[in-house]
Amino acid sequence: QAVESFNEYLDKDHSAARRDALYMLGLSYYQTKVYSKAAETLGKVTTTNDALTQNAYLHMGLSYLQLAEKNKARMAFEQAAASNANMQIKEQAAYNYALCLHETSFSAFGESVTAFEKFLNEFPTSPYAEKVSSYLVEVYMNTRSYDAALKSIDRIAKPSAQILEAKQKILFQLGTQSFANANFEQALKYLNQSIAIGQYNRQTKADAYYWCGESYYRLNRMTEAARDFNAYLQLTTQPNNETYALANYNLGYIAFHRKDYSQASHYFQKYIRLEKGENTTALADAYNRVGDCYLHVRNFEEAKHYYSQAEQMNTPSGDYSFYQLALVSGLQKDYSGKITLLNRLVGKYPASPYAVNAIYEKGRSYVLMDNNNQAITSFKELMNKYPESPVSRKAAAEIGLLYYQKDDYNQAIEAYKQVIEKYPGSEEARMAMRDLKSIYVDLNRIDEFAALANAMPGHIRFDANEQDSLTYTAAEKIYMRGRLEEAKTSFNKYLQTFPEGAFSLNAHYHLCLIGSEQKNYDMILLHSGKLLEYPNNPFAEEALILRAEVQFNQQQTADALTSYKMLKEKATNVERRQLAETGVLRCAFLLRDDIETIHAATDLLAEAKLSPELRNEALYYRAKAYTKQKADKKAVDDLRELAKDTRNAYGAEAKYLVAQSLYDAKEYNAAEKELLNYMEQSTPHAYWLARSFVLLSDVYAAMGKDLDARQYLLSLQQNYQGNDDIATMIESRLSKLKVKN
């Protein structure tokens, strides 16, 4: 009857309806179990901070519980518990709020821990106190708000065994969270604290040892890494999972770096037996490493077997397997088979970093088969295709030598001249000068040789005068003894005395290294610049690494981009190519060159062995560039990939941006689903989670659900502690919602 009467009243005078009428109508709906109407009506009452609003929020929460909408119930109870108008209602609301947090596992900003702790502090004699205490232990075990939980536990004077087990787990989670953000020293701090607590949970302790091993490995502290991986293997109760397999894989690499090939082979083969096929890249890599181990002990047939297994897996590292198979054939003196494999390698993997060496090795095979004409053809092919590669320097010298051995002196002279002109300061250039001298002596053309020697770049001579040689050698010996300041003076003195001396490039290179040791960046730029005046010299690659790093750190970004691009062209191994690609990507992104950023990120993501940290960085930069280029679908694809792990900063922002893209496309239901999933998943990067609360309020406002929009904003206002622009966003939206009401 009350429902009918109040509705009749509201129909007559809706514009100036009394709050108490709405309140009593809402409670009447609640008493008659029409819970959806109760929540909707009571929501219209919550416009002022008073006892009426507090009780309305309590019954809204109770109504939502009956409707199984625990998220909405949680926020209603939260608002009722925030008011001191009626302490009995506050107590009941605070208890229900804590319970909802626990049952929904919701703790975006540490609420689950603080709500229970706050309840026990505010209502120590409550009939709910005992239940809340027992729930608090469960919260510690299941929370994702690790910092809040750890602070809470540390306030307990005499923690129980259950709480210490929870602390062990929380420290472990903080450690893995730091690892995900590439903060390995911080990860070790938390993980070692977790281990030190004891063995309340054996598997948690074992897992902490594993991630300590991973952290030490990333920090290149191999002895500690091996110790902790072994501790994990001894302690774990789960020998059939991926982590157990990876511990063996990592121990294999540690032994491999120590050149203990027998031990390395043992661990890699164990990994192969344990791997269930989920990680084909690592599995192919393990096959390759076992092949390497057998190759080092000259067991060629076993090496070929494992390389073949790796290549058949069709992973990006297949080119390495092919190349090694070819080398093994050469070691077995099957030069024809080696050439066949090298040709297949270049055909199947044209962009492979091994393609350069493959052509060189093909030439060497022809030399060993006494087919000098084919060898020269191969070496010339290499020089034409990869003129910047240091391998071309060796090929050029080989061409001169082959002509010399054939007594084709004119061709040999031209070939050797090319070596000296293109690769000044190199050992090949010195050898070329020696052979040229012999040729001209044989031809009785000594004057011509003398004129040629003086005309070569940098006046490089075969016979450096004694003072030149002794002055440089003395400086080098001082450098080798670690007396850097004295060595710097000596190298500079050498360059002043012999500015175009036979060892001038060596001197500039050592001055680069001293500059690096002393953090003298101007010195690095000066001497690396001198080295790069002869871009094909043997020190160019090292000089570019030092030069690019200095330019990048000094914000000479355009110059750094040029240096990293040159380094990519010259890189002689996968690691240096990856270093160059990473530099190109970062420079392009800072220069806001979207097209260059997209190309650089795509190149980097194609690398066979890429750390998760670099992969995330490349995906993030590419997504940003795609967005600016209006390639929204491609951007969202990259963001969704990043959003799979919200523990790191890139993933945290990406998850928000995916939801923002859905909101912008007016796909409000999909945006709501994405944001609620984010809140359930959580992240240590609170700012992006707070932005997600704000965005969810925008979604609800767009859907006409103003009450829900306001509830999320109020909840955020009460729980978010950041000192940034979030507070302004909340205020502006709350004022708009008030105007609309």
Image (cartoon, grey):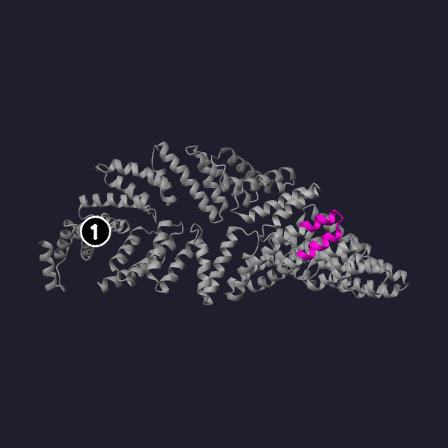
Which of the 4 quarters of the picture holds residue 21?
A: bottom left
Residue 472, placed above or below residue 169: below
Which of the 4 quarters of the picture holds residue 363?
A: bottom right
Q: For the magenta stretch, what is the residue range?
A: 324-344
Residue 273, placed above or below residue 639: above
Circle 1 — which element?
helix
- Number of marks present in the image shown: 1
Can residue 241 be seen by looking at this rendering? yes
Image-based side of 423 in relation to 239, left or right: right
In the image shown, does 236 or 333 lie closer to the viewer? 333
In the image shown, does 694 or 270 lie closer to the viewer? 270
Image-based side of 684 in relation to 507, left or right: left
Residue at image coords 70%, 50%: 327
In the image shown, does 37 or 456 lie closer to the viewer? 37
Image-based side of 713 in relation to 404, left or right: left
Amino acid type, callout 1:
Met
Mark 1 residue crowding within 10 angstroms, few (<14) / some (14–19) / many (20+) = many
In the image shown, does 431 or 99 lie closer to the viewer? 99
Which of the 4 quarters of the picture holds residue 687?
A: bottom left
Quarter of the rendering occupied by the C terminus: bottom left
Quarter of the rendering occupied by the N terminus: bottom left
Residue at image coords 50%, 41%: 243
Residue 294 x %, y %? 67, 42
Residue 246 x %, y %? 53, 42
In terms of secondary structure, what is the magenta stretch mainly? Answer: helix
Membership of 55 in magenta stretch: no
Residue at image mark 1: 60
Residue 51 x %, y %? 16, 51
